[in-house]
Amino acid sequence: DAKDMKILKELDSNADITIRQLARNVRMSHQVVEYRIKKMMEDKIISDITSWIDMGKIGYLFFRVHFRFKSITKEKRDEFENYIFSNKKCFYMSTLSGKWDSYIDIFAKSPLDFEKQIEEITNEFQKDIQDYETLLVSRLYVFNYKYLFEQSERSPIREFVMFESFSEEKIDDIDRKILKILAKNSRKPYLQIANDVGLSRSSVKERIKKMHERKIILKNRMNLNFNALGKNSFKVFFKIRGNVEEKKKLINYARMNKNIIFVLEIMGPYQLDFEIQIESMEKLQDLLIEIRNNFPIIHDYEILSLLKDTGTDYYPIEKGEYAK
């Protein structure tokens, strides 16, 4: 309803806002605000509120893998999903409709590490996987949910970029424990985190501050369930023929568009991947006509429909060796 929408807009603008300040901004009691946020999380409208961690800063590469299955039952799909999230450094997984049935985002320390992970997956499910395709993600742009705002409202444009640079920042075991906690709930109080990791509240606060300054933690963000908001989600892959400046203009267009939530610069059959959350296929087609008419550098494109988010882990490193 309208009250929930006010809360979502505030959290979209600032996921770190205190309950007290949020309550003042939306003119509700803090008890009502707390109840409504809890209810929206129970109803899966808000998926989570988490810290987004730049894995490139601690020495990881980012790969996306599309899978097509020969034929697969619900039980076998569940087995596949459980295996991926239990054994691999999987950041995100989704079921698809189109050329591919599923995709996973995987972090790896090197191409050899990635090849080993894929070999283990294909060996485990060799009777089920018909084909797969690998993309290397060189940069990920994350935009806010501008479609929450009416046309008459001024929609803030907020973004952050993952994998803008690669390095091997030093973090210790305590930092890793803190990152794991924040990757599940960035609004967890410092005191509770301190109790979990065995430090004082002030020490935890200082460590988190430094990881923000070093851009290991990029941003705290509310993540929404597109299905619960009446949106359909599509992946649109673009083949680009043009110079770097023209590609930057296309990315800037995506930044300003209310329905484009993620942009990936990729290496593989395509060069750009837009995730678009929109009301219908008809509206998607209208948007794509506009994009193609304005950007002749687009040589070809492919559409995949996202059916369901099947899992996200914003810091999946404990499943393999830690970054040292």
Image: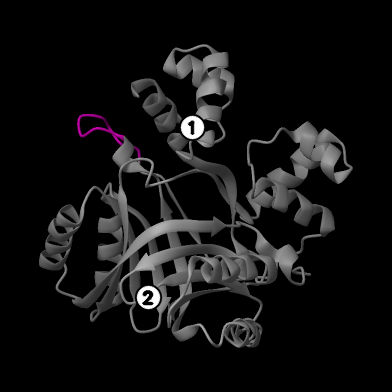
Q: How is the image coloured?
A: one colour
Is residue 172 in the magenta section? no
Q: Determine if residue 255 is in view.
A: no
Read off the magenta span: 149-156
The x, y position of residue 288, in whole percent, is 17, 62
Amino acid type indicated by mark 1:
Met
Residue on which disc 1 sits? 40
* Nearest to the observer: residue 203 or residue 91: 91
Relative horizontal placement of residue 109, taking residue 136 as reference (left or right): right
Marks 1 & 2, CB-CB < 8 Å contact: no
**Quarter of the figure with the N terminus:** top left
The x, y position of residue 301, in whole percent, is 23, 75
The x, y position of residue 99, in whole percent, is 32, 77
The x, y position of residue 62, in whole percent, is 54, 72
Q: Quick one: which residue is furthest to the right in this view?
A: 198
**Quarter of the figure with the C terminus:** bottom right
The residues bearing labels 1 and 2 have C-alpha atoms spaced at a distance of: 31 Å
* Nearest to the observer: residue 6 or residue 129: 129
Circle 2 residues within 10 Å: few <14, some 14–19, many ≥20? some
Residue on which disc 2 sits? 100
| Secondary-structure class at tag 2 | loop
Amino acid type indicated by mark 2:
Trp
Q: Which mark is residue 324?
A: none
